[in-house]
Structure formats: C-alpha cells, structure tokens
Image (tube, rainbow, N blue to C red):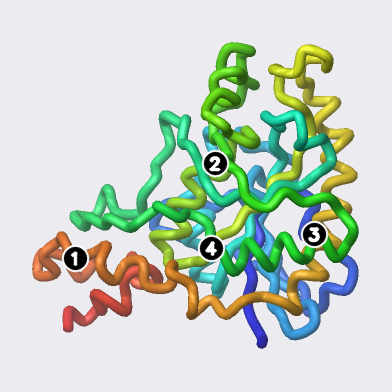
Amino acid sequence: MANTLGIIGGSGLYAMEGLSGVEELRVQTPFGEPSDAIVKGTLGDTTLLFLPRHGRGHRIAPHKINYRANVFAMKVAGAEQLLSVSAVGSLQENIHPGEMVVVDQFIDRTRERASTFFDEHGLVAHVSMADPVDAALAAAVADAVERVGAKVHRGGTYVCMEGPQFSTRAESELYRSWGASVIGMTNLPEAKLAREAELPYASMAMATDYDCWHVSEEAVTVEAVIAVMQANIAHARRVITELVGHLPDPAQSPAAGALASGLGITDPTTVTADVRRQLAPLIGKYLPADGS
C-alpha cells in the first residue's frame, strides 16, 4: 500500500539513489525551527520525508536539537510513521560495531529537553509509553535489515543520555547492569513526541563502538565512530530501499489513537481557539479549531 514514511537521521541519509520528485520543505511550527529543511521524494509507491536531526553538516548538538519542532514538522509534512536512524554505542559483548539493533524499549537519562507538546498551552496529555516502539514497524525494519544481509538484533533497550559528552566507565557499567543493549543521545524525547503526534515509531540503532566499558577496546572517539558510521549509513540506505515495499498499515498501530484518552483530563472548554489552531495537526480531530 502507498504510504508516507518519515525518516529522522544523520546528515547525508536523504541522498539516496532512485529517489524521484525531490523537493525541500521548509515547515514552520509553534515550537520554532526544525533542524533543517525536510527533503521529500518518492521511492516506488512510497513518499519519503528525510530530516537530519543534527542539521546538514552535523551542526546541532544532541541536547540542543529542537525535537518538538522536528516531530511536529514531520506530522505537518504528511508523515504517517517515523523511523529513527541513529548511531549508538554497544553495551553488550554480542552486539558488535557495524551491527544494527531494532530496539523496543528506552531508558530516559536526559535532563534538559522539552518532552511534550502540551506543557505551554493549558492542555495536558498523558499518553501510554509502556511499549514505545511500534511492533509492526519494528518487525518490518528488522526484516528489511536481514534481507539486505546485515546483522540485526531484534529488540533491546536503548539508554538515552544527555550528552554531548560520552559516558564515564562507571555510567557505562551501570547501564550494563540494568541489562541495556545500546546507548545513544537522540531517541528521546523523539519517541515520546512521536507517540503524542500519534505516529508509529521505530528505531534502527547502528552500533559504532563498545562505549567505554569494554576494557579490551580503546575508549570511544569521534574518529572511530565516524569510520563505522559511514559504513552503517550505506547499509541504512539499502534497508530503507528494501523497507518501503513492506510498510505496515499505520492506521492499525496503537499509536494512531494515542491522544483519544490522553487528552481526556483537560476540560475542553478551557482550550482556547488559538491553541486549537496552533496544535491542529496534533489535536484537530479531538478538539476542532471551531470549538465544536
């Protein structure tokens, strides 16, 4: 079935062979500017929307990314589901650099990031995050990784740290003791905001190093990460090409109705017309701008 897939990832990932009808979209949001223009194109019957979360040239640090603007812009641009592509450190011996993990859980160790669309508008939303990753989309991604011949780990817990510094050894060992699989700096609050935007979300985490816990390896460096990341990006392009013909129906995702009960705590008569208008891409089907 035809679909629109939003992809939030690293710089350069939007440059794919076979992408037709390419155009750039500049989307304004109530939360400010997204990281960059969205690159829109088609691959087969699927519309792809690419957004480099760090901006082209990797100029925005993880803790300074405007996650709300990024996810809101993707929603406005027509994304029906979101795939995160990101570099991570491995916290487990059996997850080797160069391999991919399609995670299914997150642990939030961030501190200073806005993690909801609804904290400044007199509107409260409580959405379920028990299962933060859409199972059908994650399975489709993992299947695509296998079909291109790359090594994939199905499921795993992603620890999202604040950054931009890498972990201390004590932190790395703590996260390993929790049973976490990988560590990164970007998937939260991205996954939380995707749920509030009712967008099915999956993450293809590409291991670039062993973090700093692995005593037989050198401590993680930017140079080492970049070297493995270049190879991983080539794999990611092939995975996306393979994935587009096998996307699940986003309407069947639990994320599709996440706000149906999540918005129920706020008295709708107190939500102003201005807020209804600003947040219409998120809440329009529950709180129409005309106040009906």
Q: The residue tagged with tag 1: helix, strand or loop?
A: loop
Precedes in sequence: disc 4 or disc 2: 2
Q: CA distance from mark 4 to mark 2?
A: 23 Å
**Label 1: which residue?**
264
Labels 3 and 1: the sequence-earlier one: 3
82 on left or right of 189:
right
Q: Position of residue 66 (x, y in %)?
A: 50, 45
Q: Residue at x 63, y 61 (%)?
A: 138
Q: Secondary structure at mark 4?
A: loop
Q: Earlier in the sequence, mark 1 or mark 4?
A: 4
- Check disc 2 and report the residue beneath it: 65
- Determine the CA span between mark 2 and mark 1: 30 Å
Classify mark 2: residues with Cα within 10 Å, few (<14), some (14-19) or many (20+). Answer: many
* Residue located beneath label 4 in the image: 134
Return the disc, 2 or 3, that comes first in the chain's sequence.
2
Residue on which disc 3 sits = 145
